[in-house]
Image (spheres, rainbow, N blue to C red):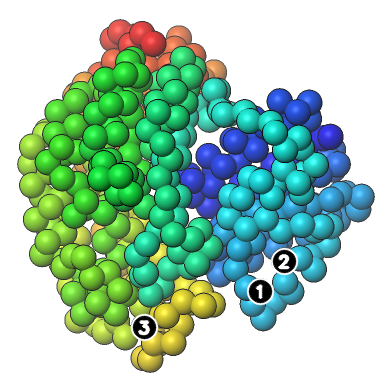
Amino acid sequence: MKLYLRTFGCRANQYDSEIVRARALAAGATIVDAPEDADVALFNSCAVTADAVADLRQHVRRAARRNPSLRSVVMGCAAALPGDAATPLAELPSVHALVPGADLDALVVALDLPSDLVAPTTRQTGARALLRIQDGCDEHCTFCVTTLARGSHRSRPADALVDEARALAAHHGEIVLTGVHIGSWGKESGASLGALLERLVREVPDVRFRLTSIEATEVDDRLADLLVGAPGRVAPHLHAPLQSGSDRVLRRMGRHWYTAARYASAVERLAARTPVFALAADLITGFPGERDEDHAATVALVHVLPFTSLHVFPYSERPGTAAARLPDPVAPRVARARAIELRELAAAKSEAHRRARIGGEADVVVIRDGAAACGLTEDYLDVALEGGAPARAARFAATLVARGAELRAEARATIAR
């Protein structure tokens, strides 16, 4: 079988695609780069916004035009949701199967792979490896379709995660812990994400770990000590979804576990403990009922907190969510204007962080080698690399220097794996 893989959306999806790739290769399949060269195409879908689903539909249709004999499988979040007013995914050209979420048992049937084949990832296609530690979410944010698509929370066993991380560490300078709600890892057994990360740091040497999105209020003392006190082992980087700086809007969003003040206190306390720290967040503008004063509260909070990057999205109504039934919709042009204002503020804060890092030391993972080599620092800065930089996925200690508008990393020493 010649298999074409196309992944949309979050790093949890990207990890699931790496699992599929590993199993397909172990079964003797060939992975191809274009749908016209494939027998089967697998589209791993995202449903977080209407645009994400529209992008999926466009790619499925385009692949079918380029290869009329193609058989397509759609997995992921969009495949797990009821059809909307547009053409159901199952009726798109070339689609012969839908696999909800990351149901690997159903997927091996759809792809006609051996059902008893287990092939964990040992070397992934990205320079940085991904390790999904859990799936699903037990919270019920009113705007979020992911809970409907991915189901309830379930943790992967710690022993399996340590074994997989050991294998990945032999080939990758950084391992990113990902999932749908990683802060809930271990709650079934009374364990915690902090305990898991402590074990990974202890038992998987010579690799840098990084967390994906985690709620600010879920960073306990154990986890905080690792984020700010384990240089070279845990990236000092917190991506903590904020969504709004207005408590009234947060309540309408169903985000009951924090207020704007609690969020601010949690991230400020953490950032104050280390001189190098990256703070990112997600924000939604134009949520139903968001008033000018709510948006102003968000802008004011972003101004005062030490953000280094923001992901800002105008609200996108998703079928089946509670927010779709809320009154007082915000005009799309207003939501877009508010998003532009926050993105401009985010760009200014990101640039200030980059300038502040000039002349400082950094721990760099090589993302791309060759003539246009680039790397990623522990505080999530993209940096250009000088000629003769280490190979892709390697790590090295560097000094950050400015070259015109570009931030560059000058190597001082290779960090062995």
Distance between the Cα atoms at labels 3 and 1?
23 Å
Most distant residue in the right direction: 69
Relative image position of residue 310 (x, y in whole percent): 31, 54
Distance between the Cα atoms at labels 2 and 1?
7 Å
Q: Residue at the location (33% across, 34% down)?
A: 210
As drawn, is 358 to the left or to the right of 167?
left
> From what the image shows, is residue 152 above or below residue 1?
below
Distance between the Cα atoms at labels 3 and 2?
28 Å
Do the numbered discs 2 and 1 sit on residues whose CB atoms are within 8 Å?
yes
Which of labels 3 and 2 is toward the front? 2
Q: Label 1 crowding class (10 Å Cα cut-off): few <14, some 14-19, many 20+?
A: few
Q: Residue at the location (20% across, 74% down)?
A: 246
Element type at mark 3: loop
Q: Mark 3 or mark 1: name the one nearer the start of the chain.
A: 1
Q: Residue at the location (26% across, 84% down)?
A: 291
Amino acid carrying label 2: it is Leu
Q: Nearer the viewer, residue 204 or 57?
A: 204
Q: Label 3 crowding class (10 Å Cα cut-off): few <14, some 14-19, many 20+?
A: many
Most distant residue in the bottom direction: 327
Amino acid carrying label 3: it is Pro
Q: Residue at the location (35% across, 19% down)?
A: 204
- Numbered circle sitting on residue 89: 2
Element type at mark 1: loop
Most distant residue in the front direction: 189
Q: Nearer the viewer, residue 399 or 165?
A: 165
Inspect this view and state whether residue 402 appears: no
Q: Label 2 crowding class (10 Å Cα cut-off): few <14, some 14-19, many 20+?
A: many
Give the labeled residue for mark 1.
83
Give the labeled residue for mark 3.
288
- Numbered circle sitting on residue 122: none
